[in-house]
Amino acid sequence: MKNIWTSIKSLLVVFSYEDDEQLKLFRKSLDKMLNTSNVDRLIIIVNIPKEVDKNSLPPHFLIYYNSPNDYNFWGKLKDVQLEAELAREYDVLLWFGDTEQKIYSQIELATIQRRIIINKENPTFDLSLNAGSESPELMLNFVINTLKKITINE
């Protein structure tokens, strides 16, 4: 019997930027978690407020910083590289926090097998998990431990 966590090969993670410290902790926790996973393709979308300068944030080859400024007047994403990533298929989406982000409508159109939202409720997701914490490490550990308990037949 396989579980959801061990079956994930491609993962899309979305979370909202609060400050540099939270971003650093999230990246560190995510790195730790991925070192012991089967994930071989990962994209991380970090939603940032429009007043935050993307160029001031630490660059990372897996992270797309997404701002309300990244959309044209009609709501179309300007970042062609991110658009290409979203055209690919993903096993799992881990969405941390609020879906009131411009990127949400783009991700709704993406081909994703399992959509999981953490610390919020949304009927368009397959699973809602309440980590009971906003700490990146505790949230990620909770999510992984929960996904390891859910067996799947494939």
Image (tube, helix red, strand yellow):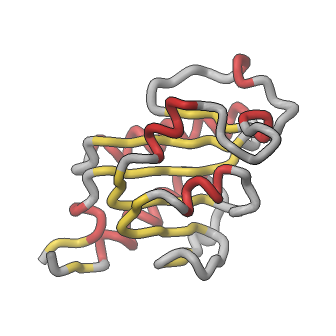
**At x 39% / y 73%, what residue is drawn?**
146
Q: Residue at x 78, y 23 (%)?
A: 53
Outermost top residue: 55
Q: In x, y percent, where is residue 55? A: 70, 17
Q: Is residue 21 left or right of residue 31?
A: right
Relative side of 54 to 51, left or right? left
Q: Looking at this view, is 19 or 60 the one in front?
A: 60
Q: Quadrant of the N terminus?
A: bottom left
Q: How many numbered marks does the figure carry? A: 0
Q: Is residue 110 visible?
A: yes
- In which quadrant of the rendered image does the C terminus lie? bottom left
Most foreground residue, 9 or 103: 103
Q: Position of residue 25 (x, y in %)?
A: 58, 39
Does residue 112 sit above or below 38 in this rendering? below
Query: Residue 135, how many percent across, how many down?
Result: 62, 54
Residue at (31, 50) in percent of width and height: 10
In the rendered image, the residue lying farthest to the right is: 51
Q: Is residue 13 left or right of residue 15?
A: left
Q: Nearer the viewer, residue 80 or 48?
A: 80
User: Quadrant of the rendered structure where residue 59 is?
Assistant: top right
- On the question of residue 37 being in view, the answer is no
Q: Residue at 28% of width from left, 48% of height from top?
A: 39
Vertical relation: 134 (above or below) 26? below
Residue 28 coordinates in the image, percent (x, y)? 49, 37
Judge from the rendering whether residue 44 lies leftward or rightward of residue 54; answer left or right.
left
